[in-house]
Image (cartoon, rainbow, N blue to C red):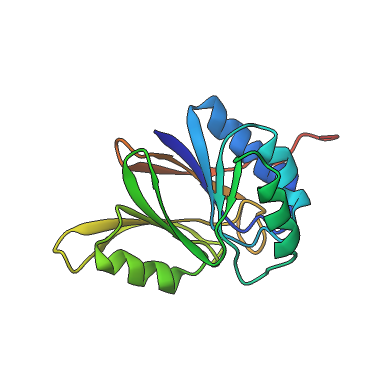
Amino acid sequence: MKICILSDSHDRGPMMARAVGIAMDEGAEAVIHCGDIIGGNTLRATIKLGLPIHAVHGNNLGDPVSIARLAHHSDGMLHYHGADAAIQLGGRRIFLTHYPHIGHGMACTGDYDLVCCGHSHIAEIRQQANILGTRTWMVNPGTVAGLGAPSATWILADLAAMSFEVRELAAAPAGA
């Protein structure tokens, strides 16, 4: 199962929808958003694409009530989990949080195959040793909005192969 992992969209809905559209074209079946969405309108274009979205909020809450309301009326397309979430996709145990330090701690437990976080606006893919003597994948997709970063980034993940690729989102064409 392929998924799109993104974070820190900061009200840049069109950029988020473009990244998810590209991921869909490459076979993605779900979206993970690691926080700092800001408002419900940020998600509307992405929800219309038809992939289930699993999202947590971050330190820039914006309007969590409107996001929760949107999730309630999304026919199961938006799962707004709150501060963090433990989910299963493609047979993998996945933990979502906004904060890298919380993600690091959860990766160390060995309870998850993959831990996804955001906040730093810096894309990173690494394996973290855990207390079970194995390693947990930890990914941070950076910022799909490109704020405070060299470029707008997101991750295309293949959960069957446990492979992850940081993607840069090219600038929108003029007039788009």
Residue 49 left/right relative to 96: right
Of residues 20 and 121, the one drawn nearer to the viewer in this rendering:
20
Residue displayed at 32% across by 45% down: 92
Residue displayed at 17% across by 59% down: 134
Q: Is residue 52 above or below residue 128?
A: above
Q: Position of residue 113 (x, y in %)?
A: 29, 52
Q: Position of residue 89 (x, y in %)?
A: 40, 42
Q: Is residue 173 above or below residue 103?
A: above
Q: Is residue 130 above or below residue 165?
A: below
Q: Quadrant of residue 16?
A: top right
Residue displayed at 72% across by 50% down: 70
Residue 95 left/right relative to 143: left
Residue 26 left/right relative to 48: left
Q: Quadrant of the N terminus?
A: top left
Residue displayed at 74% across by 43% down: 44
Number of numbered discs visible in the structure rendering: 0
